[in-house]
Every structure is written in C-alpha cells, then in structure tokens.
Image (tube, rainbow, N blue to C red):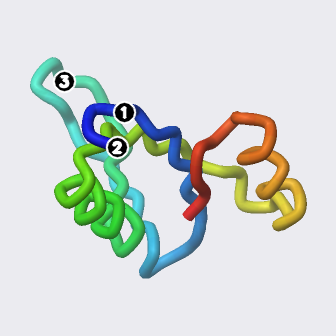
Amino acid sequence: LDGITLRIGIGGIEPFLFFSTVHDASGQNRTKITGYVPDLVELLRSKLGFIPDMQLVPFNVINDVLIQTVNNGTYDIII
C-alpha cells in the first residue's frame, strides 16, 4: 500500500474520537480529531506506507449502509 491514498471513513464517540478546535498559522479555526481511531490509522500508516484521507461518517448511518459505502467506492475502509 506504499504511497496509495486510502479513503478512510471514521465514526464513533469518545474515547475513539475527540474533536477540538485549533487555530492554524493563518488564524483559521480548524477541527482537530484525536483519539484511538486516528492513533490506529497513524500506526497502520507508519507500518504500511499508505496516505490516509480520513473522512467523518455521519453518526446515524446504519451498518448495512456503511458496508455499501465501501462496496460502491465511497470509502476504501470504515473504522
């Protein structure tokens, strides 16, 4: 997977995901995502070399629909 971009659908609640607002160098507010899921993605990235494109999955989506989003190519993987 070295160098391949993976679209990773992430969803969940604390402690799997934490959201905080940070100010970047240009003074813009950005949402920073931390927690177990981003840590897991980073560990896998460091071992496998892929480029993560993490995208938030709507919280109210049922599992059958999530599986379809992988099947139809919206995401490469859901965590």
Q: Residues within 10 Å of mark 2 (few under 14, many from 20)?
A: few
Residue in the image at 32% along x and 49% along y: 32
Q: N-terminal of the two: label 3 or label 1?
A: 1
Figure quadrant of residue 66: bottom right
Residue type, label 1: Ile
**Comparing labels 3 and 2, the label whose residue is closer to the camera:** 2
Q: Secondary structure at mark 1?
A: loop
Label 2 – label 1 distance at C-alpha? 5 Å
* Of residues 19 and 45, the one drawn nearer to the viewer in this rendering: 45
Q: Which residue bears the numbered disc 2?
A: 1
Figure quadrant of residue 28: top left
- Percent x, y for residue 46? 18, 56
Q: Residues within 10 Å of mark 1 (few under 14, many from 20)?
A: few
- Circles 2, 1 touching at the beta carbon (< 8 Å): yes
Furthest residue toward top: 26
| Image position of 70 (left or right of 48) | right
Q: Which mark is residue 27?
A: 3
Q: Which residue bears the numbered disc 1?
A: 4
